[in-house]
Image: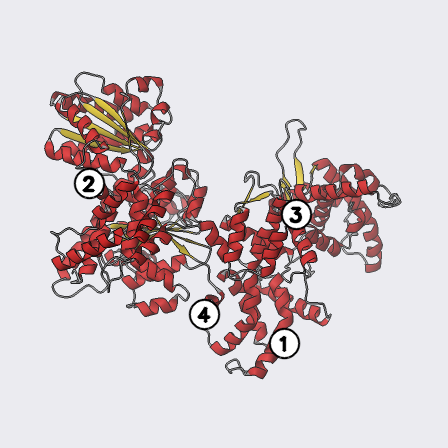
Amino acid sequence: MGSDNPAEKALILHRTRLSNPNFIFTHFSNSPDTNYSKLKFIISSSVTEACNNSVLLLGPRGCGKAAVLELVLDDLLKEYPDMITTIKLNGLLHSDDKCALKEIARQLCAEHQLSFSKVASFDDNNQFMIDILRECGLAHKTVIFVLDEFDLFAQGKQRLLYSLLDAMQSVSSQAVVVGISCRLDADQLLEKRVRSRFSHRKLLFLPPSAEDLQGLIKHMLLLPTDSSISDDYTTEFNARLLKLLEDGRCKDIIDTLSTSDSTFNHLIRFLFIAVCHMDMNLGFLTLENFKAALTGVQRQPKLECLKDCSILELYILVCMMRLEFREQESYNFNTMMKEYSSIRDSFKTCDYYARNVCLRAFEHLLQRELISLVDSRGHTQSLEFHPVKLLVSAPELHLGLKSNRCCPAILQKIIDRG
Amino acid sequence: MSKDKTPQTTRRTTRLSTSSPSLSNADAKLTKCCSTPHSLTLRDLVFGGEIFNADDLFASLPGRRGVILELIRLLGPLNSRMLPLFLYGGVSTGKTTTVLQMFRHFKRPFVYVSCRSCYNPRILFESIINQLLLHSKNEGNGYSSAKRCEKPSDFVNYLQDALGYVINGLKEKTEKLSLKKSLKWVKGSMVYLIIDNLELVRDWDKSLSILPFLFKLYDLLKMPELGLIFISSASPDTYHSDTGYTEPIPLYFPDYTEEDLRQIFLRNQSNPKLYASFLDVVLKPFSRVTRRLDEISTAFSHLFKIYCEPLEDQTIVPNEETKRRLFSHLQPHIAPSLNEIFRVPSVCSENRANKEMVKWKLSGNKLGVSDVLEEIDFHMSVCAKYLLISAFLASRNPATLDASLFDSTGGAATRKRKRKASEKSMEQKDIAEQELLMKGPGTFPLERLLAIFQCITSVADYSAEEEELDHGGLGGGAGDGGLMSDVLLQLSSLCSANFISKGSSCPLEGSTRYRCTVDENMVLKVARSMKFPLSKYLYRN
């Protein structure tokens, strides 16, 4: 039931591309000397030469470690069918050893069409894994273990890591262990006996540089010529997009984006929002879409919270800020109320409310996380005596007061005088 | 592959159930009716009901037009893939309502879970899988879930199977009918998973592993036909994690402005003009205190009744003169209502509060800050009241003063004459006051509490006996023996009511220390009800 509107088809195509985490990295698959080619070389050489290997992929979150590995594995599966078995584990799910071995056994059974028993014990699964490794080694098949969130596997006793790396030491096995982690010191977390069995090969993944960004955006947004969308629309769309990307203002937007956070994930989110804002009637991407996407993806939550505060809550924040200026180390609701009444006396404000109303507004501020209790353990005291601290700084509070629509002018005066 | 049995909850057989003979005819029929369960179909994944078009959507959610348009853009056309969304905003800003009404409009299948009713990971996982497998808990299967699922790894496997099953079912249905006509009750073959109240997950035991897992769920599943929507009342920067997590696309729900609140309140009113004139009067002062919808609406419902009191006919359209009359009737009630805005009155206390307010208005008080002095509106026994007063005194007074305050003459006879305060002592007084404000009430051991209690009750007995002779005796035998026997019992009930908090026992001193957590107003009310001269015993610098 597709519509005939080419803009809508283009939108669906873009959304599909952007939601697919691996698509953005196909841009790098052709250039040499990237992590993609290095990784492919390591794994393919251990497949062809029938040797064991282990490698760590390190880098900040959202830089494509898992995606590049997926691409490499897909390519290798096409090149060497029937010679590779992959087992994928994730530290978030399988950091417990029993769980991990059960999952390994399950995936091995699914791969080799064996029946999987869910009540097998840890030793049974362990034995099963060692047997399969031996069989695969004798049949010249390589088993590739992918350990995502590697640092979570390194917590506790590291039994799984030891048994995996130990199984690789035998002559008859052919296995590759690939660890993926966002902690750059992941190999320091390993125990001595595990680290000695680990070949210290590490590949570092970095966020894209500024030159790469332009190329990446073009790769993601340019419509392919061989899709079901009409050719006139495609050529027009691509021409307009290229012209837009050359525009200085657009370059400024992309620079602002990459200075705060230059990872691939951030870029993908930005492009997704921009593509969603595309006007269906117009049918092409414009600068306004990019501007809207920039505000959508770069949020200032504390400022938004301050804009939404009611006047009483702003008074409470200003009182606490004044107490901080006077360098009181700790203060609580009672001292704040004293300050509140002293403000009323000195500035003759009309907003003076009873104690229980102020206490409830205080609780609202705690809920909004603009203030917080200093130590949340030990709730033996009532809320009025708990020391609290401000979670917004003075410049943020100034900015918040200015942008709040219903903030009375006297509050600005009070906080300046403070 | 060995099949996993659905977990049967084991039930203990009681003597009654084993000993009861066969059921009577009526009972048998009843159980037969209940035993055929209402089986769920794919239709239950979609918001049922009439077609709900876009205009209705915008009309039912005033003030949310911009947010709804943004959400529609992010959800995208039918069957288009989506990155996970994260909707956040203050409390009671309509996040859940907006999302659910949007799915009512779009008629796309969705699964909704809230982390408030699913309060640990196991219940959360099982609830999602039950909804996807169209399994309902009923008597037939012993109220058990379809699959037992505790660990995230099992959850991911079951979820992939369940989603595959649902999506294939949806695709079959749409393909079968696409030639003849389009399905009215469901659109598309994507399933959306809505997880509400995500901020509560931060307080769970396993939150360090569950939160990054939930955020990464979309990447782990690798199923593009799933759309993930998170709803939270805390902003995304408050979700801390040591190693970071994959961030979803944020969308902010701002608080309602005054105009929005006015539109919301004017919906579904029987007499809109009357209510509009009411809102003109009250909305502005109340929105200075808070703009939270739930709190304002409770205050307004009470005030509107007062506002309409002078009107004989509730359906008239008020003109200027009527408006002024109603305003002057309402005005004295606004200020005290402002000061009590967060109080949810119970029915009987409402009547009492009304009477109190009328009395208070007649006494001609100024419209300013004054806490309405009432009686305590729950019952406490005499012994408990004395115990509370003694606990308060023990917390507030330093222990060294006990001897002078509670001597045999009933206290206050040997107070020192006031000397002129020097500057240094004034400073010290300030510092001491500051400390009192900061530290709060002090702790006391049980022996001190009992000693003060003895003193007070002996004095009170003495004066009570005099009164009894006048009144002809209330309850005989309220002597020392009668009161002391259930003191410890009363103490434990005061502790469980959180009037007195029990600290942990110090290993050096060996005994537990208590602390009175009641504020002075409450104790004043209690003392007044007992005719106890509290101010005489309270140590003030």
What distance separates the C-alpha of mark 4 from that of mark 2?
51 Å
Pick whichever, B155 or B201, lies toward us.
Answer: B201
Callout 3 and callout 4 share a chain: no
Q: Which residue is mark 4?
A: B263
Image spot of residue A32 (x, y percent):
18, 33
Query: Residue type at mark 2?
Result: Thr
Classify mark 2: residues with Cα within 10 Å, few (<14), some (14-19) or many (20+): some
Among the two numbered marks 3 and 2 on one chain, the one whose residue lies closer to the N terminus: 2
Chain name for mark 4: B
Q: What residue is rendered at 36% in x and 67% in y?
A: B58
What distance separates the C-alpha of mark 1 from that of mark 4?
25 Å
Which is closer to the viewer, label 3 or label 2? 2
Q: Which residue is mark 3?
A: A335
Element type at mark 3: helix
What distance separates the C-alpha of mark 2 from that of mark 1?
73 Å
Image spot of residue B525 (x, y percent):
71, 55
Pick whichever, A214 or B32, lies toward us.
Answer: A214
Q: What residue is rendered at 61% in x and 61% in y?
A: B340
Q: Which residue is mark 1?
A: B328
Query: Residue type at mark 4?
Result: Gln
